[in-house]
Amino acid sequence: MTTNERLRGSIVAARLHPTGLAERIGVDPKTVERWITKGRLPHRTHRVAVAGALEVDEAYLWPEILGQRVTQSASVAELLELHPTRASVPHDTWQQLYGSAREAMDILTYAGSFLFEQHEITEVLRTKSREGVRCRFLIGDETSDAVRLRAEEEGTSGGLEGRIQLHRRYLRDVVGLPGIEVRTHGTTLYNSLFRFDQDLLVNGHAYGAPAGHSPVMHLRRVPGGRMWEHFMRSFEEVWDSGTPIEK
C-alpha cells in the first residue's frame, strides 16, 4: 500500500491535522486519511482546494498527475527538485524561499559570492530580522587550511580568501540585529547548505569545480524522511564549532 508522505508532511508543516484540513475543504476526515494512508488520488477540485489550503503546488502533493511515479517513501518524497548546477536554480526560486521564511534561515558556505552579488543578502537579513526570523550564517575562515586548500583545488589561490574577507565585512553590518548570528568556520565544505524553514537547498561540491557549477538538491522536510535531517545535523555540528564574528 502506497502512502502519500508529501501530503502528510505538508499538513504538519501547515500546523494542521487531517481533521482540520478536512474542515477547511469540506470533506470527511476519513477521506483525507485515505488520501494519506492509501495514497488515493483526490478529484481535481479537491486537489486544488488542498493545495490552496496548504500553500503548496498540486503537482508536489500528487506528482502522478504529471505522469510521474507515485512517491513511495518519505525519503523519496523529500526530494522536490534536482538542478544540474547552482546557476540553473531560478532567481525566482531563491526569492520565494527567503521571502517566505517565517521561522528560520540557515546558510553554510565559504564565500557565498552569489548571495551578495545577485541577492543582496545583507538586505534580506535585515528584513528577516524585522520579521522576527532567526538567521544563522556560516562563512569560511580565510586563514584556515581547508579554505586555502579549496582555493588551490579550484585554481583561484588568493581569490577565495579575498572574497571571504570582503563578504565578512558586509556581514558585520547586520551582526547584532535581533535574531542574526554570523560565525566563521574552517571545516571541509562538502556541501553548501541553504535552509529556509522546511525547505533546504543542498549544493554539492566536486573536486576542482566552483560550487556554482555543481548540482543542487531541493529538499522539503517530511515526517520520517532522512535526507533533510542528515544535512541539517551537519550544519549544527559546523555551527557549534564556528567562531562568532563581532561588529
Image (cartoon, grey):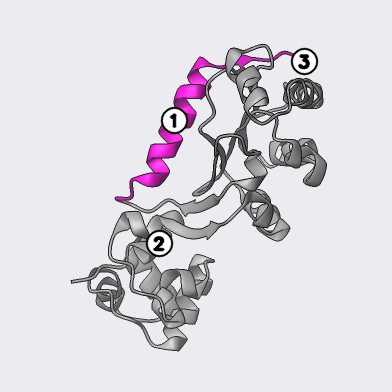
Q: Nearer the viewer, residue 75 or 205?
A: 205
Q: Quadrant of the C terminus?
A: top right
Q: Kindly state the secondary structure of the residue where label 1 is placed.
A: helix
Question: Does residue 57 appear left or right of residue 125 in this picture?
Answer: left
Number of numbered markers: 3
Q: Which residue is mark 2?
A: 11
Spatial CA span between label 1 and label 2: 26 Å
Return the mark for residue 234.
Answer: 1
Position of residue 215 relative to residue 157, above or below, is below
Tell me the mark number nearer the camera, choosing from 1 and 3: 1
Q: Residue at x 48, y 74 (%)?
A: 59
Question: At label 3, which amino acid type do we have?
Answer: Lys
Question: In the rendered structure, are the residues bearing label 3 and label 2 in contact, judged by CB atoms less than 8 Å apart?
Answer: no
User: Which residue occupies 52% across, 70% down?
Assistant: 57
Q: Which mark is residue 247?
A: 3
Residue count near mark 1 (Cα–Cα under 10 Å), binned few <14, some 14–19, many ≥20: some
Nearer-N-terminus badge (3/2): 2
In terms of sequence position, does the residue under pointer 1 or pointer 3 come before the other?
A: 1
Q: Quadrant of residue 141?
A: top right
